[in-house]
Amino acid sequence: MRKKRVIAGIVTSALLSTVLIKNIAFAAYTVDGVSMQPTLKEGHHFYINKLTNRFNKIERFDIVVFQMPGEKQVLVKRVIGLSGEKIEYRNDKLYVNGKYVPEPFLKKNKEKVYGNPITGNFTLKEITGKEAVPEKCIFVIGDNRLNSRDSRHFGFVHEKNVIGEVKP
């Protein structure tokens, strides 16, 4: 009888430990909205490793999940600008520090609008008042540029507000 209790205790401890680790390290999300289409469609379910963000450097074109201070809603967007970079869009093309940077993930979206621009012209200075992305911040935009609330509207995202990276 004592042996069964010990085994039951071990199994219970293992299950509780697994659930605890899962809740600390991983988070489940569902895409709510169309701002990342066609990369992530509305209703798409995914998990992120919350610990990865603590060890990996955020890179351009990563897709990240973050929460703005004072808001409950969690957002998912693509990283376009990194700390210290000057970002500009001209003629539907991304320029980082004055150099053109292709965005191949936008090909499907650009095909849908038949040659019309999907990203309006702007510089960081025009929309944020800053020449470059501030230290420890990122500039994010949704892939569905015509239907995305992003850094063009709410400004920079501090890296500490990034929950994790999405691997589509």
Image (spheres, rainbow, N blue to C red):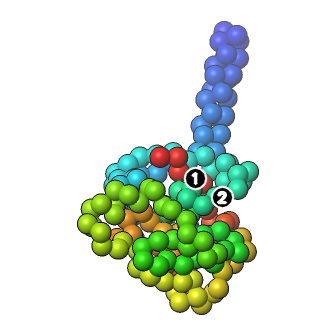
- What residue would you read off at disc 2? 58
Residues packed near mark 1 inside 10 Å, few (<14), some (14 to 19) or many (20 plus): many
Image coordinates of residue 38 in percent, x first then y, are: 35, 55
The relative height of residue 48 versus residue 104 in the rendered view (above or below) is above
Q: Which mark is residue 165?
A: 1
- Mark 1 vs mark 2, foreground winner is 2
> Where is residue 146, by image quadrant?
bottom left
Name the N-terminal-most of marks 1 and 2: 2
The relative height of residue 75 versus residue 87 in the rendered view (above or below) is above
Residues tagged 1 and 2 counted as in contact (Cβ below 8 A): yes
Residue at 61 percent across and 29 percent down: it is 15
Residue at 59 percent across and 37 percent down: it is 19
> Where is residue 69, by image quadrant?
bottom right
Q: CA distance from mark 1 to mark 2?
A: 8 Å
Residue 109 is at least partly visible in this image: yes
User: Which amino acid type corresponds to the residue marked 1 in the rendered image?
Assistant: Glu
Image coordinates of residue 132 in percent, x first then y, are: 66, 80
Please indicate whether residue 153 sits to the left or right of residue 23 in the image: left
Near-viewer residue (14 or 9): 14
Residue at 54 percent across and 78 percent down: it is 88
Near-viewer residue (30 or 154): 154
Please indicate whether residue 89 sits to the left or right of residue 132 in the image: left
Image coordinates of residue 78 in percent, x first then y, are: 51, 62
User: Which amino acid type corresponds to the residue marked 2 in the rendered image?
Assistant: Ile
